[in-house]
Image: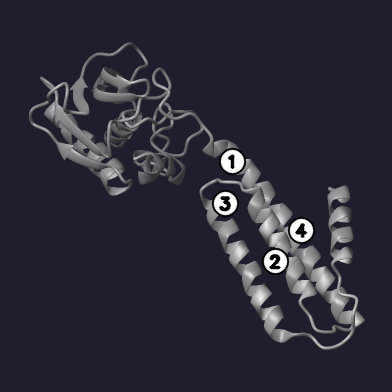
Amino acid sequence: MLAVVQSIRRRAREHQPRARGRLNGRARDGHGMQIRNSLARFSVYRSVGYHSGSLESELWGSAVMWGRRTESPTRAEGQMRARVVLGFLCLSLAISGSLVQTESVAADDFAIGPPNAGWKGDSSIHTFCWGAGFDAALQNNANWAMGTSLDRDTDITDQFDVTCAEGATDVEWLDANLPAGTRGQYSCQVKVNADTCNHSHVTLDPAEINMGSLDEEDTSKTACHEAGHSVGLIHGAAFTDCMRSGEIPNGLEEYRTYNGHHTFHINSTY
């Protein structure tokens, strides 16, 4: 880190204005705005977990030009501008370090299929139906997964399809006794291509779900989890939304919906 800061200081000195005179305020303000715009783009990219070296270069360039675009600064003014450049570059390093850390989170697998994920749906219109004998008590939970978790919070549009046709309906909801420890299950029945499913079964097992104190919330969490697989999401023990594996940790809605990371995955695909 010390070597990096020393390198930045050398670069700042190289671009320090040599001449004397008065500051060109218009040039200073213009490049100050350019720096602020660069920082704003850094903030947006950081919010979605994306890292871009070109933005670091842009921030460096904006800061340097702000320091150089003067008419005839005094020595003190030139030194002040060099320090400003150094400050912006240190901020750039701090921000880019944060972006690198979040990049690995944004790069998890998507639409790789079972056992840890599902396949993509064939379009942003995600149709669903009740399979034969689907428990009416579970329909509210399935409606939550399709209508709230997906339709309300992402670019997916859900549509109920009474036909439940294998070649037309994306998700058929079922309930059954699953293997011990399996609360819900996604399986593709009709595959379109290597990573896209045209008709899937989502099965819930209330006996495996209803083992805690938040059974209703846990059922909606499991329905949201399996619906997430039907659009390509992967599950994991560390996730902070319904794609978390296992029992719901509390009754907060965040564990019955998709976090920003998974919403970004979905909206970038459909």
Provide the residue designation for mark 1.
103
Callout 1: SS: helix
Q: Earlier in the sequence, mark 1 or mark 4?
A: 4
Alpha-carbon span between mark 3 and mark 1: 9 Å
Residue 194 screen position, x and y as percent: 37, 20
Q: Secondary structure at mark 3?
A: helix
As drawn, is 266 to the left or to the right of 81? left
- First in sequence: mark 3 or mark 1? 3
Give me the C-alpha separation between circle 2 and circle 3: 19 Å
Q: Secondary structure at mark 2?
A: helix
Using the numbered discs, state the Cα–Cα distance from disc 2 to disc 4 in whole angstroms.
14 Å
Give the image location of residue 212, x and y in percent: 34, 28
Q: Which residue corresponds to mark 4?
A: 90
Q: For residue 217, what is the image quadrant? A: top left
Location of residue 104 in the rendering, given as x and y in whole percent from the top left corner:
59, 36
- Tell me if label 1 and label 2 are in contact, CB under 8 Å: no
Label 2 amino acid? Answer: Ser
